[in-house]
Each structure stands twice: as C-alpha cells, then as structure tokens.
Amino acid sequence: MLTLHHCLSARSFRPLWALEELGLNYQLIVLPFPPRVHDKGYLALNPLGTVPLLLDGETRMTESAAICQYLAARHDPGGLDVGMSEADYGAYLNLLHFGEATLTFPQTLLLRYRFFEPAERRQPQVAEDYAKWFLARLRTLEPRLAEQDWLCAGRFTAADISVGYALMLASHLGLDAQFSPAVAAYWARLQQRDGWRRALAVQTEAAQAQGISPIAAPDIRP
C-alpha cells in the first residue's frame, strides 16, 4: 500500500490532494511540525526530516511536485497526467514545477523571517520582499487563467495541484487578497473540487486519530 508521511497543510498536502483526486488506497501518517524536531525517529525514514515522504514498495520520494507527477503518470495517464504526445506536455511540466520552485520557495522565506525565527532574528523587510516576489511571479498566470479554467491541456491536472497548493499557502499568509482577478477565480474553483475538500477532511481526521494538534503549520526547509 502507498504510505504518505504528512504534516498539516505542509507541502505534503500536494500528494495528499493527488491521492484523493485519484481515489487510491493509501496510509496517511500525520507527523508533528516540524518532524525533524518533534519526531526524531522519523529521521531514520527520511534523513532530511521533511515532509512529504511517499513510500510505494521500494520507491521513496520526498519532493511534493515530483510525487504528484509520479502518481499521475502511474495511475491516471491522459487525465491528471499529461502525456508526451500531448501539445501541452511542456507547459504541463513547466507549470508543475513552477508551483514549487517559483511560487512556494519565496513563501517559505516569508514564513521563516516573519514567523518561525526567534523574535530577535526576524526580518520584516526580507519577509515583505519575498511576499512581493511571490505576487509578481503569480501574476504571470493571469493571462492564461483569463482564457481557461485550468492551467493546461484543457483539464485539471497535477500542475493545478502544484500551483493550487501555493495558492493555499498564500491564503494562510493573507496574500490571497492581492490575487489578480483570474487567479482569484481560479483559486475559488480549486476549492470547489471534491478531491481538495476530501484531502482537507482526511488530514484533520487523521491528525485527530493520531494525537496530532489540528493547528496547521506549513513546512519550511532551512
């Protein structure tokens, strides 16, 4: 069985959302945040101490966008996945990784320097600069989303999960008020998906069952 190690509303929400969209059977292990501090035993499974960690037989994966790509390609070719023969294959790969490398990265620095560092090490100007960086890069999606409901291939794909998580994190940070009109409408559509709603419910139920505080805390990587 697939096993996903997860922290509430961290990057691991991407593969959790993908698992729910795909309707796969899996085991969800919810860890206290950050696991590298609060669950030292987890380091034996993932020396990075980060989430996600997906186990699928001998396969071990720790990158959230890559896990979404893996699950989509293995379990939903032509659906959540975009194949090499499709015209939007390049756009799909670019947007899939844009969600993590370009959109989530500046938000993690905002989190670190506004919230997670000790008070004496916080850097309000750094946090503000990275908030502006995120919003500037997010606006590049406006023309695309003004013309279509989903990012590529005429359907909801793993690229939407990758970018959608970045919007979810932005909403936790209060940046959603600055979304451009088409991006705001896109974010509203994403929140109507049954897979997204199920993933939210599943993580809360699993956390409660496993004795983890239901307070969400997005994952950062120093």
Image (cartoon, rainbow, N blue to C red):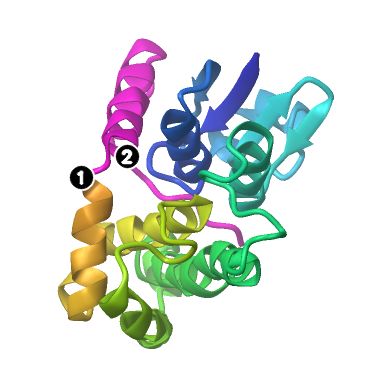
Residue 212 among those drawn in magenta: yes
Residue drawn at 50 percent across, 28 percent down = 31
- Percent x, y of residue 144: 37, 79
The three-letter code of the residue at mark 1 reads: Gln
* Pointer 1 local density, CA inside 10 Å: few below 14, some 14–19, many at least 20: few
For residue 207, which numbered disc appears in the image? none
Quarter of the view holding residue 210:
top left
Residue drawn at 55 percent across, 70 percent down = 98
Image: 15 above or below 187: above
* Front residue of 61 and 214: 61
Q: Which residues are magenta?
A: 193-222
Residue linked to disc 2: 196
Report whether residue 128 is seen.
Answer: no
The three-letter code of the residue at mark 2 reads: Trp
In the picture, the quarter occupied by the N terminus is top right
Residue linked to disc 1: 192
Residue drawn at 41 percent across, 54 percent down = 155
